Image (tube, rainbow, N blue to C red):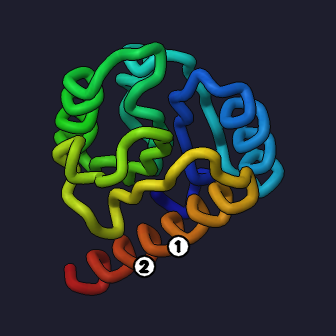
C-alpha cells in the first residue's frame, strides 16, 4: 500500500450481500474493490486485503489452503480476512494468526466487516511506515 494509490481489496464470495453490500460500502470509503464469485478466480496479486469465504462454491478446504499458500507467497502478501459459517479457527487454513489474517463468522454485519477492513488497512500502513523508518 502506497500513498499514490487507494487501498485495493478483493472480495471472493458467492454471497450477494458480501459482493454488493460490502463492496459498495468500501468504495464509498475510497477503497478500490474488485469482486469474484469463485475462489479459483481470486488468484490476482496487487491487493492489500483479500476477503474470502474458503468454502464458496463448495471448493473445500484443500482449495482454500492452496489459495492461502499462494497469497502468502506474494510480495508483499495481502492481508486476509476469512469469512465463514463453518470454520471456527483460522488455523484450519494454515494461516498464521496475527494482523495479516483474521476470521469473522458469518453472518456478519456489512458495517462490521468494513470496519475490520479499515482497521486492517491502518495496521498495514503503520507496519509499512515502521519498515520505512527502519530502513
**Residue on which disc 1 sits:** 122
Q: Quadrant of residue 131?
A: bottom left
The foreground one among 57 and 98 is 57
Vertical side of 106 occupied by 56: above or below: above
Query: Mark 2, residues whose alpha carbon is within 10 Å: few (<14), some, or many (≥20)?
Result: few
* 88 sits left or right of 24 in the view: left
Q: Is disc 1 placed on a helix, strand or loop?
A: helix
Mark 2 and mark 1 residues within 8 Å of each other at the beta carbon = yes
Q: Which residue is located at x 75 percent, y 58 percent? A: 111
Q: Quadrant of residue 16?
A: top right
**Residue on which disc 2 sits:** 126
Where does the image place residue 86, in percent across and percent down from the top left?
41, 39
State the count of labels.
2
* 70 sits left or right of 126 in the view: left
Where does the image place residue 79, in percent across and percent down from the top left?
38, 53
Query: Mark 1, residues whose alpha carbon is within 10 Å: few (<14), some, or many (≥20)?
Result: few
Q: Which residue is located at x 57 percent, y 45 percent? A: 106
Where does the image place residue 94, in percent across and percent down from the top left?
17, 45
Amino acid at each position: 500500500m502506497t500513498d499514490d494509490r487507494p487501498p485495493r481489496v478483493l472480495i471472493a464470495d458467492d454471497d450477494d450481500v458480501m459482493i454488493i453490500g460490502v463492496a459498495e460500502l468500501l468504495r464509498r470509503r475510497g477503497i478500490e474493490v474488485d469482486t469474484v464469485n469463485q475462489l479459483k478466480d481470486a488468484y490476482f496479486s496487487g491487493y492489500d486485503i483479500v476477503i474470502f469465504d474458503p468454502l464458496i462454491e463448495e471448493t473445500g478446504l484443500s482449495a482454500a489452503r492452496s489459495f492461502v499458500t499462494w497469497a502468502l507467497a506474494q510480495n508483499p502478501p495481502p492481508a486476509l480476512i476469512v469469512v465463514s459459517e463453518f470454520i471456527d479457527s483460522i488455523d484450519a487454513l494454515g494461516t498464521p494468526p496475527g494482523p495479516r489474517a483474521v476470521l469473522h463468522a458469518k453472518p456478519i454485519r456489512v458495517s462490521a466487516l468494513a470496519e475490520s477492513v479499515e482497521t486492517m488497512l491502518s495496521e498495514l500502513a503503520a507496519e509499512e511506515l515502521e519498515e520505512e523508518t527502519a530502513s
